[in-house]
Image (spheres, rainbow, N blue to C red):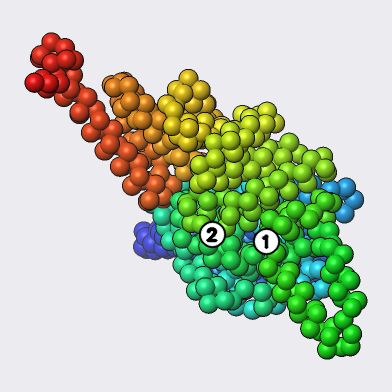
Amino acid sequence: MAGFWSMVGLVIKSLITGNETVENDEDTAEDRAAEDTSYVYAIARFSAPQPAVSDQFADMIAASLTKIPESRAIRVEQYFAPNPDTIDPFQAMREAQLVVLNTGKRVDADAIFWGQQDPATGDLDVHLVSEPLVSSLYDLMLPMTYVFKQPDHPDVAEALRILLAAALLLQSRGGEQRLLHISRLSSCLENFQDRINQGDKLTAVGSGVAIAYAFGVFILTETGDRSYCVSALKVLEPQIRAILTDAGDAPTKEAAIQRKASAGLLGEAKQHKEEVAKEAEVRAEDLIARISDFSKINARSTAVLAMYGGLVNWSLIGNLKARSGAVATGIWQLLERRFEQSVGSPVACALAICKLGEAMVASGKDAEDAKMVDEAGAQYRRALGMINNRTHAPLYSLTAYGLAESIVSSAAIKDVSIPDTQVVPVFQAALKVCARRDHPYIWGRIMFALATVQLTNGGLHKDMELLTSARRGFSQAYEAFVDAGAKGAARAASGGYTRSENALSQLGHRKAIMDATGGDDAVKAPAS
C-alpha cells in the first residue's frame, strides 16, 4: 500500500511540474513575441498627471497607432513642456526634445510622442522625437509641431500613422526591411496625395495633417523616391506664404493710400479682394526679400521652412521643375541669418549653409552658371569650418560631398577636365566619416559620385587603374543603394558598373593590339 501511495504522489508531482512547465513556456512565448517587435514607441502625457484621471489625448494617439505592424506602444506617465525662461524658443525646443528622448531611452523606447494642449486655442500640439531625428541632419527640424484642432478626426489618425511609419523607416536596417517600410509609408501617403492633387489643402483639422504628410514625404525622398515631392510642396505652399507674409515688412505705402481712397462697405470689400488677389501673385522669393527682422521667424516656422527648403532642394536635384532655385536659396539664406542673429548653434548655421550650397549647385547646373556653382563651393567651405567631423559625422560627410560635387559641376560647365587632386581626397574624406550602415543612401551617393569621376578621367587618360577603381566603386555604391531601398539609384549604379566594364574591356583590347603590333601607331589604320 505504501508503494501505491508513493506512485500516486509521483504522478501528482509530475502533473504539477508539467503544468508549471507549460505556464513557463507560455511566458517565454510572450517574451519572445515582445522581443520580435522591432520598434517600441512611447506616448507621454499631454496634460499634468492627476490621480485616477486618464489622458484622453494619449489614449487617442495609442488607439490611432495600433494598426502599424512591428511596433508596440508603452506609456510614460510624465508631462513635458519647453522651458519658457529660455531666451531662444528654438533652443528651448531642442533642449526639451533631448530631455524627452533621454526619458524614452530609460524605458527602451525608440521614439516618443509628447506635447500639450494649447490653453489659448484648445488645439493639440504633438511632437515626435527619436534618435535619428536628433542627428545633425535634422537639427533645424527639431521644433517641428503638429497642430490638430479636432484630435478625434480620421485625418489626424492618418497623420499620426504617417509619423510613426516615417520613424520606422528611419530606424530600419537592411534592404529588405527598408523596402518594407518604404512600401508602408507610401501606402499611408497615397490617399492624401490623391486629395492634394484634387485641390485639398488638408487644413480642415489644423496645419498638423499637411505638415505630417510633408514630413513623411521628406523622409521618403531621402531613399531616392521623389514621387510625392511635388504634392508635398503644393500642400505646404499656403503655410509657407503665411509664415513669410507675417514675418515680412509692410508691402508698400501705395496699398495703404488706395485702401483709404475706397469709400463705402462695398468699395472696401472690393478693394480688399483686389489686395488679396494681388498678394497671392507675389512670388515667394519676393516675400522673403521683405523680411528684415529675422527674429519674427519663430521655432515652429523655422522647422517648417527648413523642411520646405529641403523638399525644394530635392526637387531641384531630381529635375522636377517644381519650384525655382531662387526660392530654395532665399529660404536657406533667411534661416542662416536667423541663426546668426540669435547666436544659434554652429550646427544649425552649418546645416543652413550646407543646404544653401546644395541649392546653389543645383540651380547653377541647371542654368550652366559656373560662377554660382563656385560660390556654392565657398559656402560649403564655410560650413566645414563650423562642424567637427567626429561629433557631427553625417553633416560633415554631406558637406564634404557637396564641396567635391561643386568642383566637379564647375569643371563640367567650364568644359575642363576634373581636377583629381582636389576632388578625390574630399570624396574619400566624406566616405571615411560617413557610417554606411546608418546612412547607406548618403554613402552610396558619395561613392557613386567618386566612381563617376574615376570613370570619366580614367576613360580620358586611358588609365586602367582608375577604371578598375571606378568599377569597384559602382559595385559598392550599388550595394549601399540596395541597403537603402533606393531602387532607381541602384539601377544607375549598375549602369555605371557596366560602363566601366566596357571601358576596361576596350582598353584591354587596345593594349593587347599594341603589345602584338609593337606600338600605338600600328593600332591606327594606314592613311593611304
Q: Where is residue 308 shown, x and y percent of the image?
A: 63, 56
In the picture provided, is 457 more to the left or to the right than 396? Answer: left
Q: Which mark is residue 109?
A: none
Q: Residue at x 64, y 65 (%)?
A: 237
Depth check: give the residue in front, 496 or 14: 496
The quadrant of the rendering that contains the N terminus is: bottom left
**CA gap, disc 1 to disc 2?**
14 Å
Residue type at mark 2?
Ala
Residue furthest to the top in view is: 518
Q: Residue at x 20, y 29 (%)?
A: 505
Q: Where is residue 220 shown, x and y percent of the image?
A: 50, 56
Of marks 1 and 2, which one's residue comes earlier in the chain?
1
Q: Nearer the viewer, mark 1 or mark 2?
A: 1
Q: Residue at x 68, y 55 (%)?
A: 285
- Callout 1 crowding tier (Cα within 10 Å): few <14, some 14–19, many ≥20: few
Residue 66's place in the image compared with 447, above or below, is below
Element under disc 2? loop
| Residue 364: quarter of image | top right
Residue type at mark 1?
Arg
| Residue 311: quarter of image | bottom right
In the picture provided, is 7 more to the left or to the right than 20? Answer: left
Q: Where is residue 8 shown, x and y percent of the image?
A: 39, 63
Q: Which mark is residue 283?
A: 1
Q: How many marks?
A: 2
* Residue 31 shows in the view: no
Per the image, the residue denoted by label 2 is 322
